[in-house]
């Protein structure tokens, strides 16, 4: 039984016990924010133009006309994990804007059974305690117009804080850079480079807690895990077009290419980089009611017979905006077509013009 408990706590330390440079690090920062964007398979890098641009493309913050506040909540793993986001942005002047946002992804009240068995080998349920594991991402964004009409750039400075109860914690820092360009005939282009400096995390491990499980399983957990990790850069490229019909109707459609510089199961994958396309659209009526959809996360999934099958993740969303208040909903995997996580997502956006 002691071996079982040691294995459970070992799972907590698995994210730390890997190579310094990893394919997947700080993945909670890649889930996405804003139900309006999630309902379009995250294909918004070319046309994001509100408070949520701090996440999707900070260059889009330049389109703000007034201060904005955004809030979002979603749950994963049958409500075991909670994902929360809050963002605020404001124009500084006619040519620059500023934003700040916070993401929290956490599993709270996890049972710590590492001390369930006392020194005499007896099971004592009073020795069970609770702990939480939480990831935080604080992003500060800046956007500015460039001398070329329709062209803007944006940068993000990110601070990452990750906590695994009393067992371990880390601090990380990173930078993003992005550009957006809009033509006179409503074509939009965007590029978002995440973790351009390879976001760096430094872990601090509680050696006293580690010692409690160090000899629980013979031959395992004999050395402290790695204390540093590096998140490799990612690139998102998007092209969008806005169509207007009879003044009251609009249609925005976008195609994005999500690039990771590693080999994985993406539909296009090489030893140098992998590319995952995404498509999203938003149909609007009198700038009040919105219907959204998209397809993304195209993967070559390995089947039981060792063959590969192409899967994708369809999304759907709706939104309503009135007098500066916008409420959005997204369902991120229609029909469970993909093995990826899916969730019901709600978000709220408030434009401070409502108070003017």
Image (tube, helix red, strand yellow):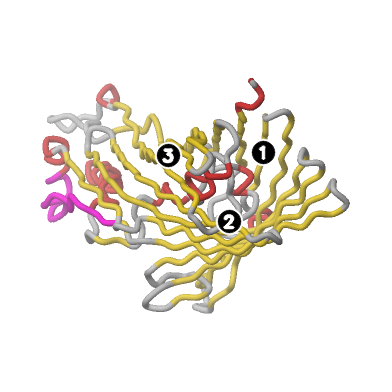
Q: Earlier in the sequence, mark 1 or mark 3?
A: 3
Q: Nearer the viewer, residue 27 or 355?
A: 355
Q: Let me know if residue 78 appears in the view.
A: no
Q: Nearer the viewer, residue 185 or 116?
A: 185
Q: Which residue is mark 3?
A: 105
Please give left or right for residue 282 compared with residue 266 in the image.
Answer: right
Q: Nearer the viewer, residue 342 or 157?
A: 157
Residue at screen point 24% across, 39% down: 169
Q: Which residue is mark 1?
A: 328
Q: Earlier in the sequence, mark 2 or mark 3?
A: 3
Please give left or right for residue 118 compared with residue 348 in the image.
Answer: left
Q: Position of residue 186 (x, y in %)?
A: 69, 59
Of the 4 image quadrants, the one containing the N terminus is top left
Of the 4 image quadrants, the one containing the C terminus is top right
* Bounds of the magenta segment: 214-230
Q: Residue furthest front?
A: 147
Q: Against 30, is 109 above or below?
A: above
Count of marks, rendered view: 3
Q: Position of residue 350 (x, y in %)?
A: 61, 29
In reply to whether residue 217 is colored magenta, the answer given is yes
Residue at screen point 61% across, 43% down: 35
Q: Nearer the viewer, residue 106 or 276?
A: 276
Q: Which residue is mark 2?
A: 150
Q: Position of residue 309 (x, y in %)?
A: 58, 74
Rendering quarter of residue 322? top right
Q: Position of residue 43 (x, y in %)?
A: 59, 57
């Amino acid at each position: 039984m002691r071996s079982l408990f040691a294995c459970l706590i070992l799972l907590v330390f698995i994210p730390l016990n890997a190579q310094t440079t990893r394919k997947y690090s700080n993945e909670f920062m890649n889930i996405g924010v804003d139900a309006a964007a999630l309902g379009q398979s995250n294909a918004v890098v070319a046309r994001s133009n509100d408070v949520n641009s701090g996440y999707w493309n900070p260059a889009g913050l330049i389109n703000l006309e007034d201060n904005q506040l955004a809030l979002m909540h979603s749950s994963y793993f049958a409500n075991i994990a909670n994902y929360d986001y809050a963002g605020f942005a404001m124009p500084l002047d006619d040519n620059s804007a500023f934003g700040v946002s916070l993401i929290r992804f956490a599993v709270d009240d996890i049972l710590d059974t590492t001390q369930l068995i006392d020194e005499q080998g007896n099971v004592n349920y009073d020795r069970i305690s609770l702990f939480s594991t939480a990831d935080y991402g604080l992003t500060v964004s800046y956007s500015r117009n460039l001398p070329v009409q329709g062209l803007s750039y944006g940068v993000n400075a990110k601070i990452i804080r990750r906590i695994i109860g009393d067992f371990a914690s880390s601090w990380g820092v990173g930078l993003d850079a992005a550009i957006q360009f809009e033509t006179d005939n409503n074509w939009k282009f965007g590029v978002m480079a995440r973790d351009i400096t390879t976001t760096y995390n430094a872990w601090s491990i509680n050696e006293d807690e580690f010692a409690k499980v160090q000899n629980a399983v013979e031959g395992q957990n004999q050395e402290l895990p790695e204390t540093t990790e590096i998140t490799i850069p990612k690139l998102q490229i998007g092209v969008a077009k806005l169509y207007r019909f009879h003044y009251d109707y609009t249609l925005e459609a976008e195609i994005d290419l999500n690039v990771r510089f590693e080999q994985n199961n993406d539909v296009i994958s090489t030893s140098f980089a992998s590319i995952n396309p995404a498509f999203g659209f938003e149909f609007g009526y009198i700038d009040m009611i919105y219907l959204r959809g998209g397809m993304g996360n195209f993967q070559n999934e390995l089947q039981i017979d060792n063959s590969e099958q192409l899967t994708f993740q369809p999304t759907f969303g709706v939104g309503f905006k009135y007098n500066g208040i916008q409420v959005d909903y997204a369902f991120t995997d229609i029909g469970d077509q993909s093995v990826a996580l899916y969730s019901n997502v709600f978000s709220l956006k408030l434009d401070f013009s409502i108070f003017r």
